Amino acid sequence: MTTTLETPKTKLPPSTHEFADIIHRLEAGEAMLPDSPENLMQIIGIYKAYAVPMDFYWRDLLYIAERVFLEPLPFFKYFLPKEYLDLHNHYAGDDADLRIWRGKATAHPELLEFMEKGEVKRKLPKLLHHWWHDRVNMEFAEECMRVMLWHRNMYVPVNRFDPYLDSEEYIANADRAIKAYFKHNPLMMGMYKLFPDMFIEQVRQMSYYSNLGLFWEVMAPVFFEMSDLYDEGKLTSVPEAMNFLVNGIFAIAGRPIYHHVYIRGECYEIIPKSKGFTWLYEAALPYVEAVFYRTSPFRGTKSYNAQAKQVPDDQKDFHYGILYADVFPVGTAGIPPTLLMQDMLHFLPPYLVDYYKQYCRGDDDVLIQLGISFQRSMYCVTSAVIQALRAALLYPLDDPNPKHLQANREFFESQLDRFKRPEARLRNIQDPDYR
Amino acid sequence: MADIVDIAVGAGSFQTLVAAVQAAGLVETLKSPGPFTVFAPNDDAFAKLPPGTVQTLVQNTPQLARILTFHVVPGKLMKADLEKVNSLTSVEGSTIPINTTDGFEVKNATVVAADIEADNGVIHVLDNVILMG
């Protein structure tokens, strides 16, 4: 299960797969994204720009799951209280469970500055920043959460979180929390009596808020640390970046995924930690499947004709995630990845700002260029997931047994089969001029 | 004869496993009459995991217990018994593939010592920690 990747000594005959070159690269311990200083700069710069809004996303997702909960008119759910800005990340700071980032455990200073002054760089009342949309776009995070909820049953049976949401135990836990939450609200209690399933479904959604919040709580320090290592000259190639992610995936695999709700000072364990749900099986793998691969057709940018089979019959065949996205038409107001691009735009490192100015239409299409860098960076993350699964479930890349190497190859080939469809951007990211 | 836990403690090459079993509160269970078949990763197997992996699990005992119970199957199954099956259902609930056609492999691990008998079951020593999926 070593992650120090070496060229295998035992050789298989060359792959005949459409992406044989990329399969050979994976077999040599590299990523789907070619190794070049330019690619490394793009992906690391984007990880840093992603980690700052992600530091807001995970905090707010947990705030909504744990405190806002079933508030019927959640007008202020994006107004993060100080308590959650000061909440210690479990993987950063001096008191970390496992210190991944050497920085602070509380909210990132660039995030705090942006929350105060926004893009206009002026300290205005919070509501003005909010209405002007000069803020972190939580709508993106919520869309990711909804996609995870909507594409249910991913990785079942090893993913136990999703089936648990239908169990009697879960419904009883949710029922207790709902009754406590609306104890002094006879109208909502009456609604609950009339439409119990609707309320339980809302709690399921809240459980996915918690799931995604706990997932991203880990990813933010991972990306911050990668950015710092790059700045210090200690992360020098795309495979090194990928291996940092592979090691991170293993290190955090056992982190608990749970859903606690705090109602009038009392903690209701809707999904207790004791269920044994883990970051890898119950959050990371379903997240990658739902968000990177599947998602859903974006409304308003393109018409999809379901009768002409432009939308797959089966949800598992959906292919609207970032690995398939045509970033140009997607770069339109109100579309979730565009909201993320807008968020990342505020926190780009200077080297990436300079880089984007040199190409295409300079400042005018930075959003598109950074969207494509984001696509490259997510192909690197997906490579890490593929290598981590290979290491966890199959064999070392330098295994002397040819049968084991063949099993690894079949795994890599089956993974890359998903990028055979024309929408996949795997071919594009091989070309440095794709921007 | 000693039980599964005593054998693992006595062998000296299962220090990580023994510490994990203690942390997860599974000592009592593995000392009970069972019987159990335990696929026991040795210390070298745990050392192959990237840094932090065991630490996170030890901090979170229900999650640790889940990984450990994936290495346990009810009943006393000797190598000869395992030659007749393709897979087993672990105490954790997930399936463990068994391959005895070419050596003795349990999922992606190789059995480096088989049929270590205990009062309450049998131990087969693995060169890898096996994971669900």
Image: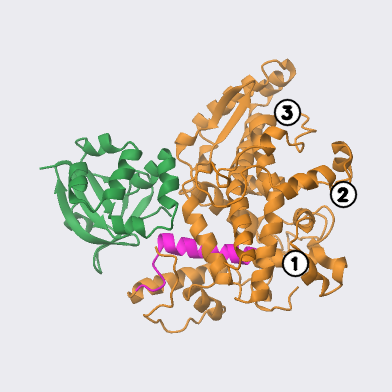
Report the predominant secondary structure element of the magenta stretch: helix
Q: Chain of mark 3?
A: A
Task: Provide the letter of the chain coloured green.
Answer: B
**Badge 2 and badge 3 both on one subunit:** yes
Label 1 neighbourhood size at 10 Å, few (<14), some (14-19), many (20+)? some
Q: CA distance from mark 1 to mark 3?
A: 41 Å
At 76% from the left edge and 46% from the top edge, which residue is drawn? A139
* Chain letter belonging to callout 2: A
Judging by the rendered image, the residue that carries numbered circle 3 is A71
**Chain that the image shows in orange:** A
Q: Look at mark 2 in the image and give the residue it sits on.
A: A121
Q: Is residue B116 above or below residue A43?
A: above
Residues rendered magenta in the picture = A378-399
Rendered image quadrant of residue A38: bottom right
Comparing B56 with A334, the one in front is B56
The x and y percentages for residue A344 are 75, 56
Q: Which residue occupies the extreme bottom position in the image?
A: A13
Q: Is residue A247 left or right of residue B82?
A: right
